[in-house]
Image (tube, rainbow, N blue to C red):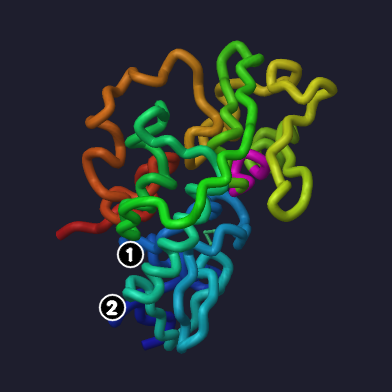
Amino acid sequence: MANTFTIDGQTVPFQEGQTIIEAAMAAGIYIPHLCHYPEFKPHGSCRVCTVSVNGRKVTACNTPAASGQVVLNKTETLQQERRTLIQMLFVEGNHICPACEKTGNCQLQAVAYYVEMLGPRFQHFYPIREVDASHPDVAIDFNRCILCELCVRASRDIDKKNVFSLSGRGLKTHLIVNSPTGKLGDTNFDAQDKAAKVCPVGAILLKRQAYTVPIGQRFYDLNPIDVVGDAAEPHYGAKHHG
Ligand code: FES
């Protein structure tokens, strides 16, 4: 049949121009991801969406869907590789889930559960990073940044403000704020900006809202991520029922 491919044996329709992840999520099939966001151009940096296409590993967020592709997604090998990536992210920053106000709403935490990460595997880096509370309505905890660049892209492409950038190379890569002081309070950033709403972790946080929803009743507390999709885009990728 034209314009279909399979994911783990299930037939998936697609439209010309769709990527594998777009077609999968439209069909209610979850492919784990962190740097992908449906409104932005593919970025291909976190590698968490890696799938096997006709026996070759590719990132689903920037690989076009094509007729007849045989895609493997939820295999033990791919889940193990994703778990390794997530375990590396957890030690590279300071992700202390029980002490983080984003717990239950955090995509990194939810993907970690999805790939059955039960604990740390690598040695923690314990980097020394700052918290920027200079803005009246938004705080940045750089300890939790995973360098997905969603805020960079949202601020540049949607908000047209260019508030964020990445600086440095390799292990020294880090998020910076584009202001003379480097402080968020010295930018024209606003809590209503798209960039304030897309952080998949607890790095960009709206002030005075941390516990309006109690822990245990939050987005991923109620259902796993492969059922409900992304917290920042709640209908995206939600499993189709019936
Ligand atoms: Fe595809 Fe990050 S979601 S590389």
- Toward the right, the furthest residue is 180
Q: Is residue 197 magenta?
A: no
Image height of 207 relative to 31, above or below: above
Q: Earlier in the sequence, mark 2 or mark 1?
A: 2
Horizontal relation, residue 214 to residue 126: left or right:
left
At mark 1, the secondary structure is loop
Q: Quadrant of ligand 1?
A: bottom right
**Does the Cβ of the disc 1 residue fall within 8 Å of ligand 1?**
no
Badge 2 vs badge 1, beta-carbon distance below 8 Å: yes
Which segment did they paint magenta?
148-153
Horizontal relation, residue 65 to residue 214: left or right:
right
Distance (Cα) linking label 2 and label 1: 9 Å
Residue corresponding to mark 1: 29
Label 1 crowding class (10 Å Cα cut-off): few <14, some 14-19, many 20+? many
Label 2 crowding class (10 Å Cα cut-off): few <14, some 14-19, many 20+? some
Q: Amino acid at mark 2?
A: Gln
- What number is the disc on residue 236? none
Residue 34 or 157: which is nearer the viewer? 34
The mark tally for this picture is 2
Find residue 143 and report its image quarter. top right
- Taken as a whole, is the magenta stretch helix, strand or loop? helix
Q: Amino acid at mark 1?
A: Ile
| Residue 4 appears in the figure | no
- What number is the disc on residue 10? 2
